[in-house]
Every structure is written in structure tokens, then in C-alpha cells.
Image (cartoon, rainbow, N blue to C red):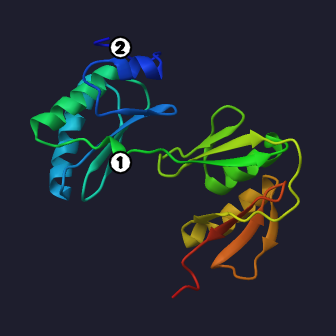
Amino acid sequence: MGGMTEPITAGQFHAADGVDDWRVLYHVVSAHFRTGSFAKGVAFIGEIDRLVATAGRSPRVDLRDAGVTVTLTTRDVTLARQISAAAAERGIPADPTAVQLVNVTVDALVAADVLPFWRALLGYRPIGNDYLSDPLGRGPGFGFQAMDVARPQRNRIHLDVAVPHEQAEARVAAALAAGGRLVSDAYAPRWWVLADAEGNEACVATWMGRE
């Protein structure tokens, strides 16, 4: 399995040597390295960049004061192994307990009726006919799950989407044009309350009016 890349299964990835730092999370593979400082994290990312230049494949990298999270969008055993080796050479430990992938799931009677609203609201891109992904890799994935019977009660959890103030009205307009409805603009421009075709709510928010 030394040079295997996709397509391989999650089980095959975890069975490979040298990838103990990594965990398969749905469609990605992720590892967290506890660098302990921002400067050490920057230096480690520089080494990852050199490995990526050779591999020709770019991971997603999240740099924080305490550590670096690296996410591969393919189950690339070779690159995962190389990044782990680079961390070990620098005395940077991995922490598999620190990786996770969050998805938001909307129960919908007809996913096709509500997905365009959420796509416009979030500025996401579709993957298949029941999933939305952040093209910049910042936010959680957004999935749609079929349900058989409508739930008439008002939902008790909603999404808040903060956008630059000059883009808020355009984002609201895009969501309404995609099949949404305006629930309330009483607090605009602090926030607008919108809902998709089945009543699931979300707010578009800005900094304005919060000083």
C-alpha cells in the first residue's frame, strides 16, 4: 500500500503503515499536529508546502496558536505518511482526538425544493443532489435527508450566517429568489429572518446596529 491513492476504502487507508496520526471522516482524511506555537506552526506548514510541491496535491490547512490541522480530500496514503514523518522529525506530536468534521442536516420532504435556498443563502456549491459544500472549506457541510411527514412546529434550531454588511441585501435577495421567504426584517440590518420552502429558518446577519 506504499503509494496508494484513491480509490481506496476507509478500511484500506487505516490498514496502511505510517498513517496512525490520521482519521477518515466521511469523504476526507484529517490529522491534527500540536505545534504549541504559531511560529512553529508556520514553519511546519512551510515543510508541508514543500511536500505538496513534490506531490502536486494540495491539502487544506488550518493554522492556530496551539496546532495545525491538515485535511486531505483524497485518501492519499503517501502524502499522509510524508506529512506525519515531517512532524515526527520536528518533534511535533499528533493528536487524533482533536479532529472532527461537522455536517448540518436538514430533514426535507422534497430536497429539490429547499436545496437552492440554502445554496444561495450560504454561497455553497452542490455535490450531487443532496449535499452542499463550502468552496473555501470554512464552514460545515450541509446535507438533506428525506422525511415522510411534515413537521408543523417551528424549528428550534436555526442557522445564522454573518456576511459583510455591503453584501447582506444581495445575499437575502439571492435566497428569496431561490425559493425562500422573508419571515421578518424587523431587525435589519442587524439580521433578516428567512425560511426555505418547508419553513426551516436562517438569519442573514451583519455588524450594523450592534455597536
Q: Secondary structure at mark 1?
A: helix
**Which residue is most to the bottom?**
211
Compare residues 25 and 117 and report the one nearer the observer: 25
Picture coordinates of residue 157 (x, y %)? 68, 63
Say whether residue 138 is left or right of residue 103.
left
Q: Amino acid at mark 1?
A: Ala
Of the numbered discs in the image, which one, if any, rests on residue 4?
2
In the rendered image of this protein, does residue 82 appear above or below residue 12?
A: below
Residue in the foreground of this view, choosing between 20 and 129: 20
Q: First in sequence: mark 1 or mark 2?
A: 2
Residue at the disc numbered 1:
98
* The N terminus - image quarter: top left
Instruction: Name the secondary structure under disc 2.
Output: loop
Residue sitting at 47 percent across and 51 percent down? 138
Q: Is residue 15 left or right of residue 38?
A: right
Q: Residue at x 56, y 66 (%)?
A: 163
Pick the residue in front: 124 or 21: 21
Q: CA distance from mark 1 to mark 2?
A: 25 Å
| Numbered label attached to residue 144 | none
Which residue does the image show at 36% across and 18% down from the upper left? 15
Q: Is residue 61 visible?
A: no
